[in-house]
Image (cartoon, helix red, strand yellow):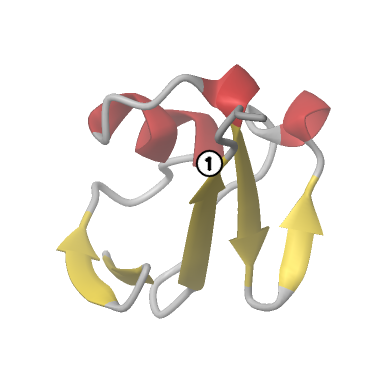
Amino acid sequence: MQLTVNGEDRSLPAGSSVSDLVSVLGLDGRKIAVERNLEIVPRSQYGETELENGDRIEIVAFVGGG
């Protein structure tokens, strides 16, 4: 299946979840926010939220600082 992640085309196997995408990208799920088709995906639902062909995903990493 084809997705757009932060403006770049990506391929993932059909049936992949947000959690699968986060793992493939090597990200720490506790330090990011994921938006799927303009809706925030709650962290507690990453494993249950199945991605679909054509989804537009935006991932934002939290950065600490002072």
Quadrant assignment for the N terminus = bottom left
Q: Which residue is painted at 59% across and 26% down in the image? A: 31
Q: Is residue 51 visible?
A: no
Give the residue drawn at x 66%, y 44%: 49
**How many tags in the picture?**
1
Residue 36 appears in which quarter of the rendering? bottom right
Left or right of 43 on screen, residue 13: left
Q: Which residue appears at 65% of the width and 33% of the height? A: 46
Residue assigned mark 1:
18
Name the spot of residue 14 as percent of width and height, x first: 33, 51
Task: Name the spot of residue 3 as percent of width and height, x first.
Answer: 33, 69
In x, y percent, where is residue 13? 24, 47
Q: Nearer the viewer, residue 33 or 2?
A: 33
Q: Secondary structure at mark 1?
A: helix
Crowd rating for badge 1 (residues with CA inside 10 Å; few <14, some 14–19, many 20+): many
- Asked whether residue 9 appears in the rendered view, the answer is yes
Give the vertical position of 8 relative to 28 (above or below): below
Q: Nearer the viewer, residue 63 or 61?
A: 63
Q: Quadrant of residue 33?
A: top right
- Left or right: where 64 falls relative to 13: right
Q: Residue at x 24, y 51 (%)?
A: 12
Instruction: Name which residue type carries label 1.
Output: Val
